[in-house]
Amino acid sequence: MAAALAASLPAPSAAPAPAAPTYEAIPASMSKVIDIEAEIPLTSVQLDGMVVTKIIKHSREAHGWTAHGLLLGLDFDGTLEVSNSFALPNHASDDDDKSAKGIARYQAAMMRSLKEVQADDSVVGFYQAMTLGSFLNQTLVETQAIHQEKLRHGGVVIVHDLSQTARGNASFRAFRLTKAFFDAYKRNNFSTSSLINHRLTFSSILEEIPLKIRTSPLLSSFIDTLTETTVRSPAGTSPALATSSAALPPSFSVLDLGTSSTSRNLERIIEAVDAYKTEEGNLGYLQRQIAREKSRADAYVAKRKEENAARVAQGLAPLPEEDVSRLFKIPPEPSRLESMLLLGRIDAYAKSLEQTSSTGLVKMYGVKADSGV
């Protein structure tokens, strides 16, 4: 039946042969800055003003979720120029495989749409929002490791601190994995000896890349006009009754004396310390189990040697040696990656607490001096 239907269909018309692509030679003046073979190392990252706005908007609207997305752009003379970005969805599903497929379909659709409008469609990294300066986790490390292996120049991860933005400081930092950590990650070996050989600590997981933000002169001029105060006087009134106003009213959030941020920071530190204590307890249990199995295996080998020595003394043939690994299941040494990430999280929370508490103390002393107490 299917063959009959196929035979009844009209024969497909021959498609015209595609035209051979033509390539233009790179001008001699640009040959030193256009890096075709990715031989010029990255020394800085440049964020477009539109990308900064989109990341801040996405981070504020992602209530209860970790905002993350992809960065698009190109590298030019050692500078990674990020010209566009788009957010990735968060799927509230227990099926990780289904969620990953949904994100992959969404990403492919976005890339096709960008290519249709002739926008930048080269992925150069991803961004992630954070709070209180802490962003080290397994997901970030795994994603950056995949990008660093497949993307041109390895890609970068840009982290945006929401707590700093709430205080009026837009915080953006660019990172990538260090060579030592990436080598240990590819070997999937984070044992004690591997950490010593690679000289790895929580502070040597990522290396920071200098970042700068680029805005057009027209946008800068427009923002300046918004912040300028204008004097307005109602018709028929004296100039003394004139009022000054600005398109963007001044924000006095920096004068807030609330201690909610400090309390929240302390709570995060306590949670991270508890998680680190639990992880160290698990590692200690596994280490004791490994030591117990090794001692049993060593005792068995020593006993077999004594038996063989006694048999040789009696003129008997020694017993054959057995594979100890088959008799005793010695578990492998546990990974210490999670412990390193938790230590990095505690360090980030502590630095954020130091900054917020010092600022709060200055405000408190200022209020006390002004009130005359």
Image (tube, rainbow, N blue to C red):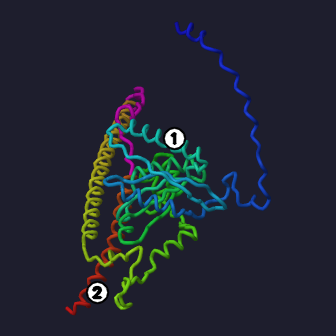
Determine the main secondary structure of the stretch shown in magenta: loop
For the residue marked with disc 2, what is the amino acid? Gly
Task: Tell me which residue sits at (50%, 49%) in the image.
Answer: 145
How far apart, in angstroms, are the residues tagged by discs 2 and 1? 54 Å
Does 107 sit left or right of 79 as displayed? left
The reply to whether the C-beta atoms of the residues labelled 2 and 1 are less than 8 Å apart is no
Whichever of labels 2 and 1 marks the residue nearer the N terminus, that label is 1
Name the quadrant of the C terminus.
bottom left
Q: Which residue is mark 2?
A: 366
**Pick the front one: 331 or 133:** 133
**Pick the front one: 141 or 121:** 121
Q: Which residue is mark 1?
A: 108
Residue 165 vertical position relative to residue 104 in the rendered view, above or below: below
Point out the frontmost of discs 2 and 1: 1
Crowdedness of circle 2 by 10 Å Cα count: few (<14), some, many (20+)?
Answer: few
State the image quarter where residue 40 is shown: bottom right
Please give the count of numbered marks on the rendered protein: 2
In magenta stretch: residue 158: no
Estimate the x, y position of residue 187 in percent, counting from the top left: 50, 46
Estimate the x, y position of residue 87 in percent, counting from the top left: 45, 51
**Pick the front one: 186 or 39:** 39
Residue 217 vertical position relative to residue 234 in the rendered view, above or below: above
Does 307 sit left or right of 370 as displayed? right
State the image quarter where residue 216 is shown: bottom right
Crowdedness of circle 1 by 10 Å Cα count: few (<14), some, many (20+)?
Answer: few
Residue at disc 2, secondary structure: helix
In magenta stretch: residue 330: yes
Residue 315 vertical position relative to residue 134 in the rendered view, above or below: above
Q: Which residues are magenta?
A: 312-336
Estimate the x, y position of residue 354 in percent, counting from the top left: 33, 74
